[in-house]
Amino acid sequence: MHKTKLLLWQHIWEHRQTGPTIYNIIRKVSTKWVGYTWKTTQTMTGHGNKKAYYDRFHLRDDIDTNCEHCGTYEDLDHATIHCNEQRLNARQLLTNRLATIQKIYPPTDIDTDNKQLVSWINQWGEAIIHDENDD
């Protein structure tokens, strides 16, 4: 039964109309926790503090759903792929955080499994969903 449900879930995952951004990163479904942070999950699923999320679920009526940098509707794809300004800001924030982290935790040679990839994706998620309280 468990295997059948996993196969069905995998089939749905491969043929769904939404979520192509996440599918490009995670191609195989699993019941095991990979290690993604809350912010990474929010970023990859299009939830969190992105304007499109508030608009989609009608959580706030007072929010302008356009990107403050270029005026385009701000959703996950826009923030992570299309908007150069947001990507530059996220990249700079990520670079600053990595510099701080590496002073405390020097990089290691962990390339034997997905730990390096999960770590990088978590850092990306942290950079995209930035809270002022994090500073």
Image (spheres, rainbow, N blue to C red):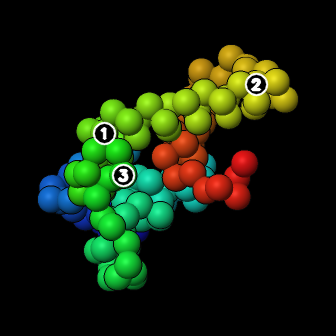
Local SS, label 3: loop
The answer to whether any part of residue 3 appears in the image is no
Tag 2 or tag 3, which sits nearer the N-term? 3
Q: Is residue 118 above or below residue 31?
A: above
Residue 83 seen from this side: yes
Badge 1 marks a residue whose secondary structure is loop
**Quadrant housing residue 11:** bottom left
Q: Amino acid at mark 1?
A: Cys
Q: Mark 1 or mark 3, which is nearer to you?
A: 3
8 or 44: nearer the viewer:
44
Q: Earlier in the sequence, mark 1 or mark 2?
A: 1
- Residue that carries the numbered disc 1 in the rendered image: 83
Residue pointed to by mark 2: 102
Q: Nearer the viewer, residue 57 or 86?
A: 86
Query: In screen coordinates, is 74 left or right of 111?
Result: left
Crowding around mark 3 (Cα neighbors within 10 Å: few <14, some 14 to 19, many 20+) is few
Q: x, y percentage for residue 58?
A: 32, 82
Q: Quadrant of the N terminus?
A: bottom left
> What residue is pinned by disc 3?
68
Rendering coords of residue 131 (x, y %): 61, 56
Residue 17 screen position, x and y as percent: 15, 59
Query: Residue at horizontal 38%, vertical 78%?
Result: 62
Please tell me which of labels 1 and 3 falls first in the chain.
3
Q: Which numbered mark, 3 or 2, is in the foreground of this view?
A: 3
